[in-house]
């Protein structure tokens, strides 16, 4: 059973037709394939809807005071896999000029809202935009292969941990906002460029970790942060069966759990354990306890912004600092 935990600063759905409709949109395309009329919120601001506050924060950084951003999930305790949309959510999407989603089976409730609301909004699908190996291409079918709405095959859908993908999303947001509000197009472009500079700062932190710790073995409870840790040159030593089971909300086999415990608490343990602090189970707790008992640092990451944090860059900066501190302490 998946249970949600409150996130700290340092740490950091109604048929398949909707999913197919969003996949047909592709990244930066209109939901029905027609030209989207600019849609404004109160005060003449451009109305933007994001599936989660991660993408909402990126849209806010690019749009600034010219946009009104609504994040459908804006709580550190909400699970996009299990989120049930409301009539109010559908009305919000129907009024939007731009909708930003993760895609790849992660936030399928948003795909269904796009389909059911009849919105004319332009839809940005981060997974399709990413160009990452295994990601469905724009216009392809990104519907999940299994009936529970999860997509946990070979492709890692947690693309907001890929800094190049986040940069693409920000640039696409600027382009689409400029199309909806041509008078302020230059402002959106400039804001995206500033955001890109901030991403460069995050990349420098990633590069510093790689320079000091490339090749070091870590363990993760879920594949959530792997784009970032792989970019930092860290090697994931976790049995795939363990992280898959945790992500699916099931108990790993006893032998798999035993192998994972050996990795974090045996004679040759990993240097750091990275846990998703928004998912806890007896298995993940046992792994974390074993790591701590063995002196292996435990770093928390999340899937939504921590309470009191509204900046993607600040959030990722804190998580990278925590990771670097753990690795440096274990060296």
Image (cartoon, rainbow, N blue to C red):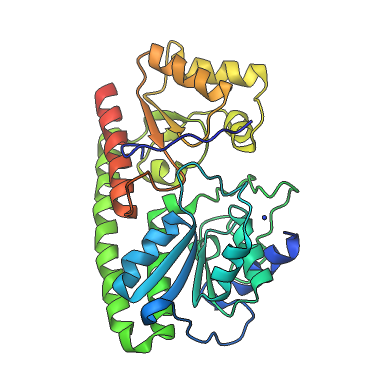
Within the image, what quadrant is residue 240 found in?
A: top right
Residue 83 position within the rendered picture, expressed as x and y whole percent measured from the top left? 60, 50
Numbered-mark total: 0
Q: Nearer the viewer, residue 28 or 262?
A: 28
Quadrant the C terminus occupies: top left
**Along the horizontal axis of the image, is 211 left or right of 164?**
left
**Along the horizontal axis of the image, is 65 left or right of 105?**
left
At 39% from the left and 85% from the top, the residue drawn is: 181
Residue 81 sits above or below residue 195 on the image: above
Res. 45 visible in picture = no
**Along the horizontal axis of the image, is 265 left or right of 209?**
right
At 45% from the left and 74% from the top, the residue drawn is: 47
At 55% from the left and 64% from the top, the residue drawn is: 128
**Along the horizontal axis of the image, is 200 left or right of 234?**
left
Residue 79 sits above or below residue 180 on the image: above
Q: Nearer the viewer, residue 86 or 20?
A: 86
Quadrant the N terminus occupies: top right
Residue 286 sits above or below residue 193 on the image: above
Res. 116 visible in picture = yes
Residue 93 position within the rendered picture, expressed as x and y whole percent measured from the top left? 56, 70
At 40% from the left and 45% from the top, the residue drawn is: 228
Residue 75 sits above or below residue 253 on the image: below
Residue 134 position within the rendered picture, expressed as x and y whole percent measured from the top left? 59, 55
Residue 204 position within the rendered picture, expressed as x and y whole percent measured from the top left? 24, 50
């Amino acid at each position: 059973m998946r249970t949600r935990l409150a996130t700290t600063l340092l740490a950091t759905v109604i048929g398949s037709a909707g999913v197919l409709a969003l996949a047909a949109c592709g990244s930066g395309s209109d939901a029905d394939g027609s030209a989207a009329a600019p849609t404004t919120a109160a005060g003449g601001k451009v109305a933007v809807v994001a599936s989660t506050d991660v993408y909402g924060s990126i849209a806010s950084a690019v749009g600034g005071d010219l946009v009104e951003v609504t994040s459908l999930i804006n709580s550190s305790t909400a699970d996009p896999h299990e989120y049930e949309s409301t009539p109010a959510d559908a009305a919000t999407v129907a009024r939007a000029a731009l909708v930003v989603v993760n895609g790849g089976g992660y936030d399928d409730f948003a795909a269904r809202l796009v389909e059911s609301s009849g919105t004319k909004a332009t839809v940005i699908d981060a997974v399709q935009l990413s160009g990452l190996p295994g990601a469905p291409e724009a216009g392809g079918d990104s519907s999940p292969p299994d009936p529970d709405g999860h997509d946990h095959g070979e492709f890692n859908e947690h693309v907001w941990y890929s800094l190049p993908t986040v940069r693409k999303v920000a640039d696409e947001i600027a382009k689409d906002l400029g199309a909806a509000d041509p008078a302020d197009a230059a402002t959106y472009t400039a804001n995206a460029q500033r955001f890109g500079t901030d991403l460069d700062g995050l990349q420098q932190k990633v590069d510093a970790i790689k320079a000091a710790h490339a090749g070091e073995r870590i363990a993760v409870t879920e594949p959530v942060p792997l784009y970032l840790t792989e970019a930092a040159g860290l090697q994931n030593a976790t049995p795939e069966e363990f992280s898959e089971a945790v992500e699916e909300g099931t108990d790993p086999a006893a032998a798999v759990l035993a192998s994972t415990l050996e990795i974090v608490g045996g004679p040759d343990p990993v240097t750091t354990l990275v846990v998703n602090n928004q998912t806890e189970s007896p298995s993940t707790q046992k792994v974390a306890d074993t790591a701590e008992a063995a002196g292996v640092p435990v770093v928390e990451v999340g899937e939504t912004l921590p309470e009191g944090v509204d900046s993607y860059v600040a959030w990722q900066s804190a998580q990278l600092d925590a990771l670097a501190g753990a690795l440096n302490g274990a060296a």
